[in-house]
Amino acid sequence: MKITFIGHACFLIEDCAGHKLAIDPYQKGSVPGLAYHDLTADEVVCSHGHYDHDDKAGVKKPAVVWNGSFDVTSVSTFHDDVKGAARGLNNVSIITVDGIKVVHMGDIGCDLTASQLDQIRNCDVLLIPVGGHYTIDSKQAFEMTKAIDPRVVIPMHYRGRTFGYNVISTRDEFEKLVASEGDRKVVRGGSVLEAIPAEKSLVLLDPLRA
């Protein structure tokens, strides 16, 4: 399995046979500093209908269409901390690929219930927003990561030096909080995770389209 960080909350997951799943593709021009995703994928999953997460129509199909299906389960949460009154619903996606359990938190803005936590605890890879304002912030993401306890955590939906919304923060605070625990190896560089580390890790991927 291979995971490519396209940018913002958009990832491309590829299984060992070359089938591809796109998650939360953003519409053209919707995220400052990011070029268009320009993705081709067999399937598309979107956490919610906002323009920076829901460009399902813009993802091209491959020349040879795969008739299979990725194993995807959705967990309904909120995009805010007022039960959806401010920004609506958000779906957490649980994706099993090549025996690896990947959880994409979407634009989660609330705490998880005990039953929701049970569904995603101890996943292999956690993709979690850390920028705040529209989502949980770095401190909340840190506490949620501790509760979920994934093997690998990858921050997303943050502001970088040349990309992202001005109202959201960088991933720096999240990195410092995770590093302060001392139980995760920090892996830096590149936009692609080619193999899942055996040890608990914080993987800092750079957006491919930045």
Image: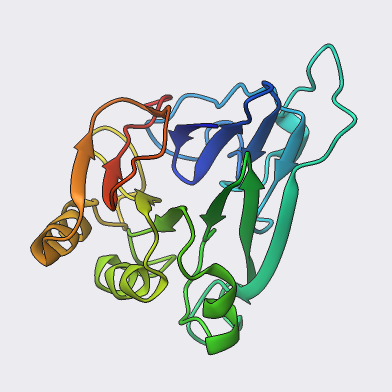
Q: Is residue 12 above or below residue 200?
A: above
Rendered image quadrant of residue 177: bottom left
- Residue 137 percent location from the top left of the image: 31, 68
* Residue 83 in sight here: no
Rendered image quadrant of residue 147: bottom left
Name the residue rendered at 51%, 62% in the picture.
107
Quick one: 160 or 6, which is closer to the camera?
Answer: 6
Q: Is residue 189 above or below residue 143?
A: above
Looking at the rendering, in which quadrant would you find the N terminus?
A: top right
Display coloring: rainbow
50 sits to left or right of 71: left
Quick one: 116 or 123, which is closer to the camera?
Answer: 123
Looking at the rendering, in which quadrant would you find the C terminus?
A: top left
Name the residue rendered at 71%, 26% in the picture.
19
* Residue 170 in sight here: yes
- Residue 17 percent location from the top left of the image: 69, 22
- Residue 2 percent location from the top left of the image: 51, 30
Q: Is residue 181 above or below residue 66?
A: below
Quick one: 197 or 143, which is closer to the camera?
Answer: 197
Q: Residue furthest right?
A: 67
- Residue 40 percent location from the top left of the image: 69, 22
137 sits to left or right of 122: left
